[in-house]
């Protein structure tokens, strides 16, 4: 390759996973990409990672992001993990199409994984080709960055390349590779892999590593592994409450997609709900609605119970005793989740104080939204407009007005008991209730242009809008509205 770049990109790798956890991964190199093109580079994230975006935005950067050149200090590896997929256990999944290049310490002192996703076969690929299609790569880039801007813990996207190759799915598709950045890629399934093999020592090593990296306070607890479960539970309960508060449906909450860090991972068939309906499902493979919007809090508990099972031998040699104390933690999940959810929803409707009846008030709004087919995002956004004196935009979201009018009256009565200026309250609400989310029709439009017409401009315009989800920008009105109602429900596909 004709490489005229001034400097080689340098990554200050410090690869603790490969150093500390031998036997939990397989070393592996990326497959070469034929004619890679750098389609997207996240300059702000590069700088946060201590990388030079100017140097990355060259042929040398493209070579790295396409897997053609391993940067100095990288120790590429595929991690082992298992997982419950739609409730059924697969003892061996693992990185079948991803490679951890290594870890860097970012400018805030935080350790971050840098991973290629779609870089070719690994020992965990089973029948798969180890590749990704470009559409899902760009989809993960876009939605992950939107989630970050919405304040949701998430893996990030550093770069997206097209490989110049075709990957065979139901139809031949252009290939792509995502460079993903994560607090780590450890999942519930990472511990399940070794627990399923009865390898208690490896489970302990992974738990110790995870405690040190993600939940260091647990190390000082009387029972560190119980405290570890509690810490993961807190992080995941907070995460799922955030998803619920913005109408996000992950779509594939398998235990291999549930991180130990509490970041959202794996933007496959995910989507944001338009009209509020708890049974909303977008994923074409989720035929039973296991991962429907309204089921996500229950699935959170189910998944953490699977993590708890892996810890049984570390908790107490008396198995029944261990199960009892782990179960006590699992039983706290609904209350922990509810606390996060109620706090988030209070803020969304502008409350600054807590009252026992607030849960009922919030529930009343949701019922009215469900019955009235109201758009989840716009209702909350327009409540602030109602506070500023114009209730028409919020009323306009409902097909039937009596329920929302009665609710608005109750809400105003509740607000009048707080000593807060309407304008200040409305401003605070505008900082947490987004106006721009990645609307399904806009995502499809952006991906179609990029994949079928090699036109990245709709993608870039949408990325710009969702990267500042709270700031109204003139000319961006069409990013705020849901797509036209179609007869067929919107479907997302896993085909990555
Ligand atoms: P995901 O649906 O992304 O959570 O992936 C589930 C499992 O399937 C993981 O072990 C992946 O590595 C594996 N997998 C998905 N797609 C491929 C592929 N194209 N080639 C090899 N393995 C894959
Ligand atoms: Mg996955």
Image: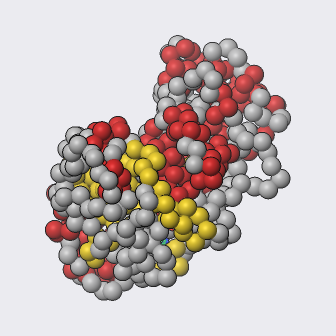
Question: What residue is drawn where x is 41% and y is 71%?
Answer: 120
Question: What residue is drawn where x is 82% and y is 31%?
Answer: 402
Q: Quadrant of residue 476?
A: top right
Q: Quadrant of residue 406?
A: top right
Residue 247 location, x and y as percent?
59, 46
Residue 331 location, x and y as percent?
44, 63
Question: What residue is drawn where x is 45% and y is 38%?
Answer: 149
2, 139: nearer the viewer: 2
Quadrant of the snapshot with the N terminus: bottom left
Q: Is residue 411 left or right of residue 70?
A: right
Q: How many marks?
A: 0
71, 380: nearer the viewer: 71
Q: Quadrant of residue 404?
A: top right
Residue 480 location, x and y as percent?
64, 33
> Coloring scheme of the render?
secondary structure
Q: Is residue 211 left or right of residue 417?
A: left
Q: Is residue 195 left or right of residue 96?
A: left
Whether residue 4 is visible to the viewer of this picture, yes or no, is yes
153, 76: nearer the viewer: 76
- Find the residue positioned furthest to the bottom: 197
Vertical position of residue 402 compared to residue 439: above or below: above
Vertical position of residue 76 compared to residue 278: above or below: below
Whether residue 308 is visible to the viewer of this picture, yes or no, is no
Residue 254 location, x and y as percent?
50, 68
Vertical position of residue 371 compared to residue 301: above or below: above
Question: What residue is drawn where x is 41% and y is 64%?
Answer: 33
């Amino acid at each position: 390759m004709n490489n005229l770049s001034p400097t080689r990109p340098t990554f200050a790798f410090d690869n603790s996973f490969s150093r500390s956890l031998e036997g939990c991964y397989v070393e592996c190199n990326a497959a070469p990409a034929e004619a890679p093109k750098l389609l997207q580079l996240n300059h702000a994230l590069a700088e946060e990672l201590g990388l030079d975006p100017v140097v990355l935005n060259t042929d040398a950067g493209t070579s790295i992001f396409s897997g053609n050149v391993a940067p100095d200090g990288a120790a590429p590896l595929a991690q082992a993990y298992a997982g419950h997929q739609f409730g059924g256990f697969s003892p061996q999944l693992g990185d079948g199409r991803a490679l951890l290049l290594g870890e860097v310490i970012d400018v805030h002192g935080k350790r971050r994984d840098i991973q290629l996703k779609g870089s070719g076969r690994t020992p965990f690929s089973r029948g798969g080709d180890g590749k990704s299609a470009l559409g899902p790569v760009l989809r993960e880039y876009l939605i992950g960055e939107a989630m970050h801007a919405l304040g949701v813990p998430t893996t990030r996207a550093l770069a997206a390349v097209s490989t110049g190759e075709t990957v065979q799915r139901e139809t031949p598709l252009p290939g792509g590779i995502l460079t993903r950045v994560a607090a780590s890629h450890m999942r519930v399934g990472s511990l399940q892999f070794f627990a399923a093999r009865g390898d208690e020592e490896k489970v302990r090593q992974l738990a110790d590593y995870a405690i040190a990296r993600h939940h260091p306070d647990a190390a000082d607890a009387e029972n560190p592994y119980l405290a570890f479960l509690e810490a993961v539970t807190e992080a995941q309960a907070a995460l799922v409450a955030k998803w619920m508060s913005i109408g996000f449906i992950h779509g594939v909450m398998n235990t291999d997609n549930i991180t130990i860090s509490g970041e959202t991972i794996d933007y496959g068939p995910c989507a944001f709900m338009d009209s509020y309906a708890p049974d909303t499902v977008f994923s074409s493979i989720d035929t039973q609605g296991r991962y429907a919007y309204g089921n996500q809090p229950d699935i959170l508990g189910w998944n953490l119970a699977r993590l708890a099972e892996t810890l049984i031998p570390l908790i107490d040699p008396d198995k029944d005793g261990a199960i009892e104390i782990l179960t006590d933690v699992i039983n706290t999940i609904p209350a922990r989740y509810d606390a996060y959810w109620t706090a988030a929803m209070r803020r969304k409707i502008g409350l600054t104080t807590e009252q026992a009846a607030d849960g009922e008030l919030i529930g009343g709004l949701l019922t009215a939204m469900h019955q009235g087919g109201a758009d989840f995002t716009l209702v909350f956004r327009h409540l602030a407009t109602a506070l500023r004196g114009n209730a028409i935009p919020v009323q306009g979201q409902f097909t039937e007005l009596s329920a929302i009018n009665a609710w608005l009256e109750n809400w105003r009565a509740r607000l009048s008991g707080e000593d807060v200026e309407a304008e200040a309250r409305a401003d605070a609400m505008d900082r947490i209730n987004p106006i721009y989310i990645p609307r399904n029709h806009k995502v499809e439009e952006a991906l179609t242009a990029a994949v079928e017409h090699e036109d990245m401009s709709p993608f870039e315009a949408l990325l710009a809008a969702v990267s500042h989800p709270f700031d109204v920008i003139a000319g961006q009105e069409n990013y705020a509205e849901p797509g036209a109602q179609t007869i067929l429900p919107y479907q997302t596909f896993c085909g990555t």
